[in-house]
Image (spheres, grey):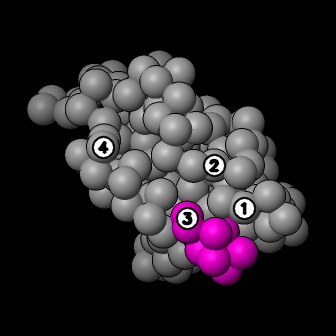
Amino acid sequence: MCPPAPHSDATLPCDEDIRALVTPLASLEGPLLPMLHRLQEEYGFIPANAVTVLADILNLGRAEVHGVVSFYHDFRENPAGRHVLKICRAEACQSMGSEDLARDTLARLGIDWHDTTANGSVTVEPVYCLGMCACAPAAMLDDRVVARLDRARMDKLLDEAGA
């Protein structure tokens, strides 16, 4: 167990914790993505100090690691809310009104994309196809895909999530 660092957030893992978690994956071919997935699975996001640890283990630059983290939308740099709502923004969903639905949803929650509601209940993220094009617009609340959304169904989803 890592000693608490002065003036640090006690909920963040220390470098030694991160190193212990990801080092077993270093021998894989292309280990960076598996390491990032493991960190996100463990902590729910990629802790900022993990970038330096991963760069050291893999002999990469911090910019290279940060570039991968920021490129993939599924990697979070901050903890998500208790529920994650992903609203599809692909062409089929856009043609069926997903942009208006997303705008209304974000306005109702008083947040922007990738933000979390003040009560910590919902984080809203864009997604670029849920494979429900014939039933657009679609969204996913946690692991549940919901199609043929309209404002009433979205309001019901948000109520279920405690938003």
Answer yes or no: do the residues labelled 3 and 1 have beta carbons within 8 Å? Answer: yes
Between the C-alphas of marks 3 and 1, the distance is: 8 Å
Residue type at numbered disc 1: Ala
Label 2 or label 4, whichever comes before in sequence order: 4
Answer yes or no: do the residues labelled 2 and 3 have beta carbons within 8 Å? Answer: yes
Where is residue 41 shown, x and y percent of the image? 65, 38
Residue 119 or residue 5, whichever sits in front: 119
Where is residue 50 shown, x and y percent of the image? 47, 52
Give the residue at mark 3. Answer: 98
Residue type at numbered disc 3: Ser
Residue type at numbered disc 4: Arg
Between the C-alphas of marks 2 and 3, the distance is: 8 Å
Query: Could you tell whether 112 is left or right of 98 in the image?
Result: left
Circle 2 SS class: loop
The magenta stretch spans residue 74: no
Circle 3 SS class: helix
Mark 4 burial class by Cα count in 10 Å: few <14, some 14-19, many 20+: few
Between the C-alphas of marks 4 and 3, the distance is: 15 Å
Give the residue at mark 2. Answer: 149
Give the residue at mark 1. Answer: 136
Identity of the residue drawn at 71% across and 51% down: 148
Magenta range: 89-98
Answer yes or no: do the residues labelled 4 and 1 have beta carbons within 8 Å? Answer: no
Answer yes or no: do the residues labelled 2 and 4 have beta carbons within 8 Å? Answer: no
Q: Quadrant of residue 27?
A: bottom right
Label 4 or label 3, whichever comes before in sequence order: 3
Give the residue at mark 4. Answer: 108
Label 2 or label 3, whichever comes before in sequence order: 3
